[in-house]
Image: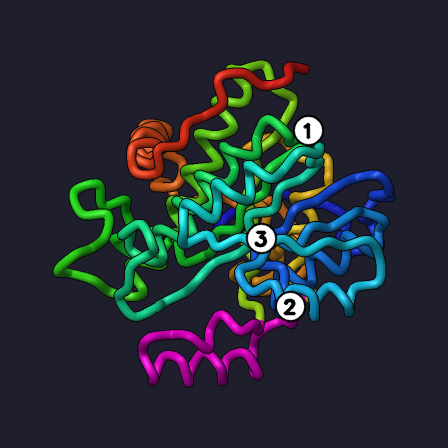
Amino acid sequence: MARRTKTPRWSTADIPDQTGRTVVVTGANSGLGLATSRALAAAGAHVVLAVRDTARGETAAAGIPGSTEVRRLDLADLSSIRAFAAAWGAPIDVLINNAGVMNLPESRTADGFEMQFGTNHLGHFALTNLLLPHVSDRVVSLSSGMHRSPGTRIRFDNLTLAGEYSPGAAYSQSKLANLLFILELQRRLTDAGSPVRALAAHPGWAATELQGHDANGVRRALMLFGNRLVAQDADGGALPTLYAAVADLPGASYAGPGGRFEMRGAPALVDRSPAASDADVARRLWDASEQLTGVSFPASLPRS
Protein backbone atom coordinates (compact mmCIF):
# COMPACT_ATOMS: atom_id res chain seq x y z
CA MET A 1 0.00 0.00 0.00
CA ALA A 2 1.32 3.43 -0.95
CA ARG A 3 2.68 5.79 1.66
CA ARG A 4 0.49 8.81 2.30
CA THR A 5 1.51 12.26 3.36
CA LYS A 6 -0.38 13.03 6.55
CA THR A 7 -2.18 16.38 6.32
CA PRO A 8 -5.18 17.85 8.11
CA ARG A 9 -8.41 16.48 6.66
CA TRP A 10 -9.07 18.49 3.49
CA SER A 11 -12.50 19.29 2.02
CA THR A 12 -14.15 21.71 -0.41
CA ALA A 13 -14.33 24.18 2.49
CA ASP A 14 -10.55 24.52 2.09
CA ILE A 15 -10.74 25.69 -1.53
CA PRO A 16 -9.40 29.25 -1.55
CA ASP A 17 -11.33 32.04 -3.25
CA GLN A 18 -11.14 31.42 -7.00
CA THR A 19 -12.63 34.74 -8.10
CA GLY A 20 -11.00 36.00 -11.28
CA ARG A 21 -9.54 32.60 -12.19
CA THR A 22 -10.42 30.53 -15.25
CA VAL A 23 -10.46 26.73 -15.11
CA VAL A 24 -10.95 24.42 -18.10
CA VAL A 25 -12.38 21.00 -17.22
CA THR A 26 -12.62 18.28 -19.86
CA GLY A 27 -15.52 15.84 -19.66
CA ALA A 28 -17.35 18.23 -17.37
CA ASN A 29 -20.98 17.36 -18.13
CA SER A 30 -21.26 14.44 -15.69
CA GLY A 31 -19.57 12.50 -12.91
CA LEU A 32 -16.26 13.71 -11.55
CA GLY A 33 -15.95 16.51 -14.09
CA LEU A 34 -19.32 17.95 -13.16
CA ALA A 35 -18.58 17.70 -9.43
CA THR A 36 -15.20 19.37 -9.98
CA SER A 37 -16.76 22.14 -12.04
CA ARG A 38 -19.51 22.74 -9.50
CA ALA A 39 -17.06 23.08 -6.61
CA LEU A 40 -14.72 25.46 -8.45
CA ALA A 41 -17.58 27.63 -9.73
CA ALA A 42 -18.96 27.80 -6.20
CA ALA A 43 -15.56 29.14 -5.10
CA GLY A 44 -15.77 31.91 -7.69
CA ALA A 45 -13.90 30.50 -10.69
CA HIS A 46 -15.07 30.90 -14.27
CA VAL A 47 -15.35 27.26 -15.36
CA VAL A 48 -15.19 26.20 -18.99
CA LEU A 49 -16.92 22.87 -19.57
CA ALA A 50 -15.01 21.26 -22.45
CA VAL A 51 -17.37 18.52 -23.65
CA ARG A 52 -18.11 16.40 -26.69
CA ASP A 53 -21.90 16.86 -26.44
CA THR A 54 -22.61 20.56 -26.03
CA ALA A 55 -26.35 20.00 -25.43
CA ARG A 56 -25.53 17.87 -22.40
CA GLY A 57 -22.90 20.41 -21.45
CA GLU A 58 -25.41 23.26 -21.49
CA THR A 59 -27.78 21.21 -19.33
CA ALA A 60 -24.98 20.56 -16.85
CA ALA A 61 -23.89 24.20 -16.86
CA ALA A 62 -27.45 25.33 -16.17
CA GLY A 63 -27.32 23.42 -12.88
CA ILE A 64 -24.06 25.00 -11.73
CA PRO A 65 -24.46 28.19 -9.70
CA GLY A 66 -21.69 30.52 -10.82
CA SER A 67 -19.84 31.54 -13.96
CA THR A 68 -19.66 28.83 -16.63
CA GLU A 69 -19.13 28.43 -20.34
CA VAL A 70 -19.53 25.41 -22.63
CA ARG A 71 -17.19 24.63 -25.53
CA ARG A 72 -17.10 21.58 -27.77
CA LEU A 73 -14.13 19.23 -27.48
CA ASP A 74 -13.84 15.65 -28.71
CA LEU A 75 -10.67 14.13 -27.30
CA ALA A 76 -10.96 11.20 -29.71
CA ASP A 77 -10.45 13.53 -32.69
CA LEU A 78 -7.26 15.56 -33.15
CA SER A 79 -9.04 17.99 -35.48
CA SER A 80 -11.51 18.83 -32.71
CA ILE A 81 -8.65 19.32 -30.24
CA ARG A 82 -6.84 21.63 -32.64
CA ALA A 83 -10.02 23.62 -33.29
CA PHE A 84 -10.65 24.01 -29.56
CA ALA A 85 -7.10 25.25 -28.96
CA ALA A 86 -7.07 27.53 -32.02
CA ALA A 87 -10.25 29.25 -30.82
CA TRP A 88 -8.80 29.88 -27.38
CA GLY A 89 -7.46 33.39 -26.78
CA ALA A 90 -7.68 34.00 -23.04
CA PRO A 91 -5.57 33.11 -19.99
CA ILE A 92 -6.16 29.77 -18.27
CA ASP A 93 -5.23 29.40 -14.63
CA VAL A 94 -5.85 25.66 -14.37
CA LEU A 95 -6.37 22.97 -17.01
CA ILE A 96 -8.00 19.83 -15.62
CA ASN A 97 -7.67 16.79 -17.87
CA ASN A 98 -10.61 14.91 -16.40
CA ALA A 99 -12.37 13.21 -19.32
CA GLY A 100 -11.84 9.52 -19.89
CA VAL A 101 -13.23 6.23 -21.10
CA MET A 102 -12.88 2.90 -19.34
CA ASN A 103 -12.80 -0.80 -20.31
CA LEU A 104 -14.38 -0.29 -23.73
CA PRO A 105 -14.74 -2.91 -26.46
CA GLU A 106 -11.91 -2.60 -28.98
CA SER A 107 -12.39 0.51 -31.11
CA ARG A 108 -10.44 3.36 -32.69
CA THR A 109 -10.42 7.14 -32.47
CA ALA A 110 -10.96 9.32 -35.55
CA ASP A 111 -7.18 9.21 -36.08
CA GLY A 112 -6.87 5.43 -35.73
CA PHE A 113 -5.55 5.23 -32.17
CA GLU A 114 -6.79 2.62 -29.72
CA MET A 115 -9.75 4.41 -28.12
CA GLN A 116 -8.68 4.33 -24.47
CA PHE A 117 -5.04 5.25 -25.10
CA GLY A 118 -6.10 7.79 -27.73
CA THR A 119 -8.71 9.51 -25.57
CA ASN A 120 -7.25 9.22 -22.08
CA HIS A 121 -3.64 9.94 -23.00
CA LEU A 122 -3.02 11.18 -26.54
CA GLY A 123 -6.04 13.50 -26.63
CA HIS A 124 -5.02 15.19 -23.40
CA PHE A 125 -1.36 15.21 -24.45
CA ALA A 126 -2.25 17.19 -27.57
CA LEU A 127 -4.70 19.47 -25.78
CA THR A 128 -2.27 20.32 -22.98
CA ASN A 129 0.61 21.20 -25.26
CA LEU A 130 -1.59 23.31 -27.53
CA LEU A 131 -3.07 25.24 -24.59
CA LEU A 132 0.09 25.43 -22.49
CA PRO A 133 1.09 28.94 -23.65
CA HIS A 134 -2.16 30.18 -22.05
CA VAL A 135 -1.77 28.29 -18.73
CA SER A 136 -0.43 30.28 -15.79
CA ASP A 137 -0.80 28.02 -12.75
CA ARG A 138 -1.11 24.28 -13.26
CA VAL A 139 -2.21 21.25 -15.25
CA VAL A 140 -3.97 18.39 -13.48
CA SER A 141 -4.47 15.00 -15.16
CA LEU A 142 -6.60 12.17 -13.81
CA SER A 143 -5.06 8.75 -13.49
CA SER A 144 -6.32 5.66 -11.66
CA GLY A 145 -5.22 3.08 -9.15
CA MET A 146 -5.50 0.68 -12.10
CA HIS A 147 -2.14 1.95 -13.34
CA ARG A 148 -0.78 -0.53 -10.76
CA SER A 149 -2.42 -3.56 -12.37
CA PRO A 150 0.04 -6.47 -12.64
CA GLY A 151 1.98 -6.46 -15.88
CA THR A 152 0.97 -2.95 -16.86
CA ARG A 153 3.56 -1.21 -19.00
CA ILE A 154 3.66 1.01 -22.06
CA ARG A 155 3.56 -1.33 -25.03
CA PHE A 156 5.79 0.67 -27.36
CA ASP A 157 5.87 -2.32 -29.72
CA ASN A 158 2.07 -2.40 -29.93
CA LEU A 159 0.40 0.67 -28.43
CA THR A 160 -2.96 -0.26 -29.96
CA LEU A 161 -2.71 -3.80 -28.50
CA ALA A 162 -3.67 -5.08 -31.93
CA GLY A 163 -4.24 -8.82 -31.87
CA GLU A 164 -4.04 -8.98 -28.08
CA TYR A 165 -6.57 -6.40 -27.00
CA SER A 166 -8.00 -6.54 -23.50
CA PRO A 167 -10.29 -3.73 -22.25
CA GLY A 168 -8.72 -3.79 -18.79
CA ALA A 169 -5.13 -3.88 -20.05
CA ALA A 170 -5.82 -1.00 -22.45
CA TYR A 171 -7.34 1.09 -19.66
CA SER A 172 -4.44 0.37 -17.29
CA GLN A 173 -1.91 1.31 -19.98
CA SER A 174 -3.71 4.61 -20.59
CA LYS A 175 -3.75 5.45 -16.88
CA LEU A 176 -0.05 4.62 -16.55
CA ALA A 177 0.52 6.92 -19.52
CA ASN A 178 -1.30 9.74 -17.70
CA LEU A 179 1.17 9.57 -14.81
CA LEU A 180 4.22 9.32 -17.07
CA PHE A 181 2.93 12.32 -19.03
CA ILE A 182 2.73 14.43 -15.87
CA LEU A 183 6.20 13.32 -14.81
CA GLU A 184 7.79 14.37 -18.10
CA LEU A 185 5.65 17.50 -18.43
CA GLN A 186 6.90 18.73 -15.05
CA ARG A 187 10.50 18.07 -16.07
CA ARG A 188 10.04 20.10 -19.24
CA LEU A 189 8.28 22.94 -17.45
CA THR A 190 11.08 23.13 -14.89
CA ASP A 191 13.76 23.11 -17.59
CA ALA A 192 11.90 25.89 -19.43
CA GLY A 193 11.86 28.03 -16.30
CA SER A 194 8.05 28.01 -16.23
CA PRO A 195 6.17 28.50 -12.95
CA VAL A 196 3.42 26.17 -14.15
CA ARG A 197 3.05 22.94 -12.20
CA ALA A 198 1.92 19.55 -13.51
CA LEU A 199 0.09 17.27 -11.08
CA ALA A 200 -1.95 14.08 -11.17
CA ALA A 201 -4.87 12.76 -9.16
CA HIS A 202 -7.04 9.69 -8.90
CA PRO A 203 -10.55 9.43 -7.41
CA GLY A 204 -10.38 6.05 -5.72
CA TRP A 205 -13.64 4.20 -6.25
CA ALA A 206 -16.25 6.78 -7.17
CA ALA A 207 -19.72 5.95 -8.45
CA THR A 208 -20.01 7.56 -11.89
CA GLU A 209 -21.26 6.66 -15.37
CA LEU A 210 -17.79 5.41 -16.28
CA GLN A 211 -18.30 1.90 -14.91
CA GLY A 212 -21.51 1.44 -16.87
CA HIS A 213 -19.65 1.19 -20.19
CA ASP A 214 -17.48 -1.81 -19.30
CA ALA A 215 -17.15 -4.23 -22.22
CA ASN A 216 -17.54 -7.24 -19.92
CA GLY A 217 -21.11 -7.74 -18.74
CA VAL A 218 -20.21 -9.63 -15.58
CA ARG A 219 -17.55 -7.10 -14.59
CA ARG A 220 -19.94 -4.28 -15.40
CA ALA A 221 -22.59 -5.75 -13.10
CA LEU A 222 -20.05 -6.27 -10.32
CA MET A 223 -18.76 -2.72 -10.64
CA LEU A 224 -22.25 -1.25 -10.58
CA PHE A 225 -22.99 -3.35 -7.48
CA GLY A 226 -19.77 -2.07 -5.96
CA ASN A 227 -20.86 1.47 -6.74
CA ARG A 228 -23.81 0.99 -4.43
CA LEU A 229 -21.94 -0.92 -1.75
CA VAL A 230 -18.42 0.51 -1.56
CA ALA A 231 -17.95 3.61 -3.68
CA GLN A 232 -18.04 7.21 -2.60
CA ASP A 233 -20.16 9.62 -4.63
CA ALA A 234 -18.84 11.88 -7.40
CA ASP A 235 -18.38 14.78 -4.97
CA GLY A 236 -16.11 12.61 -2.83
CA GLY A 237 -14.29 11.26 -5.87
CA ALA A 238 -13.61 14.79 -7.10
CA LEU A 239 -11.79 15.82 -3.91
CA PRO A 240 -8.30 14.62 -5.00
CA THR A 241 -8.69 16.53 -8.29
CA LEU A 242 -9.73 19.67 -6.44
CA TYR A 243 -6.87 19.22 -3.98
CA ALA A 244 -4.39 18.96 -6.85
CA ALA A 245 -5.98 21.96 -8.58
CA VAL A 246 -5.87 24.46 -5.72
CA ALA A 247 -3.62 23.29 -2.86
CA ASP A 248 0.00 24.39 -2.61
CA LEU A 249 1.61 21.15 -3.75
CA PRO A 250 4.93 20.41 -5.48
CA GLY A 251 5.01 19.78 -9.19
CA ALA A 252 4.61 16.13 -10.24
CA SER A 253 2.60 15.39 -7.07
CA TYR A 254 0.00 12.62 -7.16
CA ALA A 255 -3.15 13.01 -5.06
CA GLY A 256 -5.66 10.32 -4.14
CA PRO A 257 -8.06 9.36 -1.37
CA GLY A 258 -6.31 8.99 1.96
CA GLY A 259 -8.51 6.16 3.22
CA ARG A 260 -7.79 2.44 3.25
CA PHE A 261 -6.47 1.10 -0.06
CA GLU A 262 -6.95 4.62 -1.48
CA MET A 263 -10.57 3.76 -2.22
CA ARG A 264 -12.21 6.72 -0.52
CA GLY A 265 -11.66 9.45 2.03
CA ALA A 266 -10.14 12.92 2.23
CA PRO A 267 -7.37 13.59 -0.29
CA ALA A 268 -3.70 13.08 0.44
CA LEU A 269 -0.47 12.73 -1.51
CA VAL A 270 0.05 9.12 -2.58
CA ASP A 271 2.77 7.15 -4.35
CA ARG A 272 3.01 6.00 -7.94
CA SER A 273 4.00 2.51 -8.97
CA PRO A 274 7.67 2.04 -9.95
CA ALA A 275 6.56 1.85 -13.60
CA ALA A 276 4.93 5.28 -13.27
CA SER A 277 8.13 6.74 -11.81
CA ASP A 278 10.46 5.75 -14.66
CA ALA A 279 11.81 9.00 -16.12
CA ASP A 280 13.35 7.25 -19.14
CA VAL A 281 10.06 5.61 -20.08
CA ALA A 282 8.31 8.95 -19.55
CA ARG A 283 10.66 10.62 -22.05
CA ARG A 284 10.20 7.79 -24.54
CA LEU A 285 6.42 8.00 -24.22
CA TRP A 286 6.56 11.75 -24.77
CA ASP A 287 8.56 11.31 -27.97
CA ALA A 288 6.15 8.66 -29.23
CA SER A 289 3.18 10.87 -28.37
CA GLU A 290 4.65 13.79 -30.30
CA GLN A 291 5.13 11.57 -33.35
CA LEU A 292 1.58 10.17 -33.15
CA THR A 293 -0.21 13.48 -32.59
CA GLY A 294 2.04 15.90 -34.43
CA VAL A 295 1.95 18.15 -31.35
CA SER A 296 5.08 19.20 -29.46
CA PHE A 297 5.98 21.00 -26.27
CA PRO A 298 5.76 24.75 -26.95
CA ALA A 299 8.99 26.36 -28.16
CA SER A 300 8.58 29.19 -25.67
CA LEU A 301 6.59 29.75 -22.50
CA PRO A 302 6.24 32.63 -20.03
CA ARG A 303 8.99 32.28 -17.45
CA SER A 304 8.78 32.74 -13.69
Q: According to the image, label 2 marks what residue?
A: 234
- Of residues 235 and 276, which is closer to you in this image? 235
Image position, residue 42 (x, y; %): 83, 56
Q: Give the range drawn in magenta.
A: 207-234
The answer to whether 30 is drawn above or below residue 178 in the figure is below
**What amino acid type is highlighted by mark number 1?**
Ser
Helix or strand or loop: what does disc 2 sit on?
Answer: helix
Q: Residue 136 carries which label?
A: 1
Mark 3 → mark 2, Cα distance in angstroms: 15 Å
241 part of magenta stretch? no
Q: Quadrant of the C terminus?
A: top right
Tag count in the figure? 3
Q: Quick check: marks 2 and 1 in contact, CB under 8 Å?
A: no
Is 289 situated left or right of 68 in this image? left
**Pointer 3: residues within 10 angstroms few (<14), some, or many (20+)?**
many
The answer to whether 128 is drawn above or below residue 262 in the figure is above
Q: Earlier in the sequence, mark 2 or mark 1?
A: 1
Is 48 situated left or right of 119 in this image? right
**Pointer 1: residues within 10 angstroms few (<14), some, or many (20+)?**
many
Image position, residue 173 (x, y; %): 33, 51
**What amino acid type is highlighted by mark number 2?**
Ala
* Residue at x 43% of width, y 37% of height: 181
Image position, residue 150 (x, y; %): 29, 56
Q: According to the image, label 3 marks what residue?
A: 26
**Mainly helix, strand or loop, the magenta region?**
helix
Helix or strand or loop: what does disc 1 sit on?
Answer: strand
Q: Quick check: marks 3 and 2 in contact, CB under 8 Å?
A: no
Which image quadrant for residue 254?
top right
Image position, residue 211 (x, y; %): 46, 73
217 part of magenta stretch? yes
Is 15 situated left or right of 154 in this image? right
**What amino acid type is highlighted by mark number 3?**
Thr
